[in-house]
Amino acid sequence: MGEEALKEMSASEDTLVVVKPDGVRRGLVGEILRRFESKGFVIKKLHMLTMSRSQAEEFYSVHSAKPFFGELVSFITSGPVVGAVLSGRDAVATVRRMVGATKSWEAAAGTIRGDFGLGLTDNCIHASDSAESFTKESAAFFGQTRG
C-alpha cells in the first residue's frame, strides 16, 4: 500500500448520526443516509429503535442541566429513530457541516436541516460534535444492540 493510501486511511474517523423521530415519520431516512454515502462516507453500523427514557437521558446527558433537557428526551423517545456510525475523512467536522445549524430556520439551504428541518427540536437529525461525543453517544445508542 502506498504512502498516500496510508495517510488517507489514518485520516479516517467515525461519527454518529441519528435520524430523529420526525425524520423517520416523514420517510427521510433513505434520503439522509444517501447524502452521506454520496459524500463518500461508509456506514459501519445501522440500527432502528425507539429509545427508552434512560437511554435518551444518557444520550443527551451533556444537556442534563439545561432547561430544554426534558423536551429533548421526550422528543427523541416519541418514536423510532435510526442511528448510523459513519466512517470517512474528517467525519465529525464534515458531517456537522452537512447537517447544518441546529435551528432549522438558520440552517443553510443544501444542508439536511436547511432542507428538511421544521424547527429547533424537530430538525430531523442529531450528529456527534466531537470524537469524545461520538464515543459516549454511540455507546448510549448501540450499547443495547450488541450481537
Image (cartoon, rainbow, N blue to C red):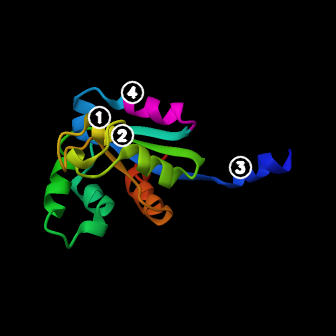
What residue is disc 3 on?
A: 9
Give the magenta range: 31-40
Where residue 131 appears, x then y in whole percent?
Answer: 50, 62
Q: Nearer the viewer, mark 4 or mark 2?
A: 2
Reply above or below: 30 against 75.
above
Tell me: 115 left or right of 47: left
What residue does disc 1 label? 115
Give the residue at mark 2.
111
Residue 81 seen in the current view: no
Figure check: 43 above or below 126: above
Q: Residue furthest right?
A: 2
In the foreground, 18 or 96 = 96
Q: Residue 110, position in %: x, y? A: 36, 36
Residue 147 versus residue 132 in the image, above or below: above
Mark 4 or mark 2, earlier in chain: 4
Residue matched to label 4? 30
Question: Residue 91 placed where, x, y %?
Answer: 53, 50
Single out the mark in the foreground, 2 or 3.
2
Q: Earlier in the sequence, mark 4 or mark 3?
A: 3
Mark whose residue sits in front, 1 or 3: 1
Q: Marks 4 and 3, Cα distance to the nearest angstrom?
A: 27 Å
| Amino acid at circle 2 | Thr
Residue 64: quadrant of the picture: bottom left
Taking the spot 58% from the left edge, 36% from the top edge, the residue there is 40
Are the residues tagged 1 and 2 within 8 Å (C-beta)? yes
State whether residue 112 appears in this view. yes
Amino acid residing under circle 3 = Met
Give the CA separation, mark 1 to mark 2: 6 Å
